Amino acid sequence: MKRTELLVIGGGPVGLSAALLAARYGVACTLVEQFPAPYNHPKARGVRNRAMELFRSWGLEQEIRAMAPPDPAYGFIYCNSLSGEEYGRTPAGPEETALSPTGSCRVPQDDLERLLRARVSATPGIDTRFGLRLEQLAQAPSQVTATVVDQDSGRADTIVADYVIAADGAASAARAALGVQMTGQMLGYWQSAYWHGDISHLVQERSAIQFLTADPSGGFVTVAPVDGKKRWLTFRMPGPDSNHPGILSEEQAKALIHTAVGVACEADVVSAATYTVEAKVADRYRVGRVFLAGDAAHVFPPTGGFGLNTGVQDVHNLVWKLSLVRAGAAGDALLNSYETERRPIAVSNAQWSTTNAARFREVWDRMTAGKPAGDVMARQRAHVAAIERDLAFRYTQGALDAGSGEPCADPFVAAVGRRAPHLWLSDAQGRRTSTLDLFDGRLTVLHGPDGQGWAKAAHAAGSVYGVSLHTVCLPEGDLHCDAADFDRLYGLAEADAMLIRPDGHVSFIGSASEGRDVEEQMLEAVRLTLCAARE
């Protein structure tokens, strides 16, 4: 029998991220995954900006970018076939480089998983066990007992954990064991073929995230670059009224590829898969000491690329809370805020991804009718240019003081519930860092140059609740930034302060004006951020 503080079930990008976070917070973690190696079929082909910010903070950015195409494109090209007549384009436009210290990255999921597996396996404090399948899950008031089975030997083992994060995918065995239902709609099936071949002469100077070609049987068949050179995905999506179409045989896959390409080509089919396409969210994210994350908690249509990215953000929201509860600095109520905060984000992303899918159908209908796509094709730019959805989502209730500041209309300006904005800082030696780096992994009080009272108040509140609060003075102090940019993004008066959570979200904005007691404000802000009982 194995005893651990945290058991992570599932070794995809979400579960692996949860394990890395646990190690960063000093939580002993065991990770189990039923497949010995990542599936050689890149279901997802990109990491959006916010998830890349997290990977950057974990020291993984450069390794991830080394696996991505050097000059990726993010728009869509619609055509009869790859070699045939082009119908139109949905360009993505330039990336917003001022909003983040990094940017999105077109890394294939299978490559990302291999990198994350290697990092997790090499990280002290994480016990990785690949090839184990979850068989049973049972809870007691103070622990969770999981029975896992070795896929090769059939031998069963028991793991007892204080808490469990179930990140075991859309067909989650953990979710089934908990009896949690999913609410939403089924949209159809996605038949996918992963193949290698040289079709560079057909895509020169018109690269895209997807080439959507016309399938004579109806709908689009996609040719999607994986590495921008010789690795490709081709898939089609029968409608929701069709029966499960099965997995493409090699012969069927090659026929589909040749239809999409439009001319004969050498296609080496590596693997094929069929996915059920749904827009569903779990009715509950927490059952006792077990928490659902990633595809176990929500499934989206692949039209938007927010599945993996939303899942990584799930565990980024959850693990710091688990670490504070485990340390005795916060009560169990803090863990309830995980569902309160993350579930509405998943519902919104599911609806948005479904809208993207519907626009594809509208473009197809206009193509087949010989009509210009016009505004439908233009509106599909929202599918690929989604920086506001990625970086400016906001928690409206949960582990925060919702009454301590009204949000600005500009979604990238600091507000309670939002991610604290990125701003470049420099030290006395001219070395640059991001504001995001200051806030990562700790409770931080950010105050203005006349707000020294907030630093004293932070120390007092930390003593009361048994937590350490880091204090930072901007735009002056040891780190320097552009004062105008700081004022525009943070809007913090010289005597005011913000409390920023370990996940980088603002939980409180305080004012020292009108004689308001800063120590009382800070005590209440910390209490609400920890979801603690009133002292």
Image (cartoon, helix red, strand yellow):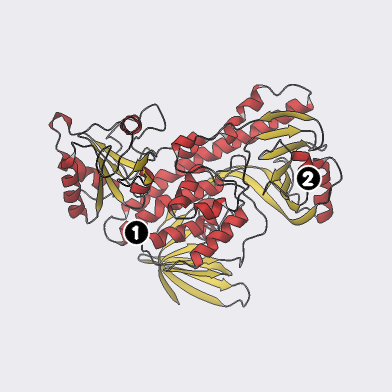
Q: Amino acid at mark 1?
A: Ser
Name the residue located 61 percent from the left edge and 65 percent from the top edge: 35
Q: Position of residue 436 (x, y in %)?
A: 38, 45
Q: Position of residue 490 (x, y in %)?
A: 32, 34
Q: Amino acid at mark 2?
A: Ile
- Asked if labels 1 and 2 touch by Cβ distance under 8 angstroms, the answer is no
Question: Badge 1: few (under 14), some or many (20 or more) residues near its Cα, within 10 Å?
Answer: many
Residue 238 position (above or below residue 322): above
Judged from the image, the secondary structure of the residue bearing numbered disc 1 is helix
Q: Position of residue 196 (x, y in %)?
A: 75, 53
Judged from the image, the secondary structure of the residue bearing numbered disc 2 is loop
Judging by the rendered image, the residue that carries numbered circle 2 is 199
Residue 73 position (above or below residue 502): above
Residue 363 position (above or below residue 217): above
Name the residue located 44 percent from the left edge and 36 percent from the top edge: 99
Residue 318 position (above or below residue 28): above
Judging by the rendered image, the residue that carries numbered circle 1 is 323
Q: Disc 2 vs disc 1: which is toward the camera?
A: 2
Name the residue located 36 percent from the left edge and 50 percent from the top edge: 440
Name the residue located 34 percent from the left edge and 29 percent from the top edge: 488
Task: Give the number of the disc on residue 332.
Answer: none
Task: Residue 473: tell me if it is visible.
Answer: yes
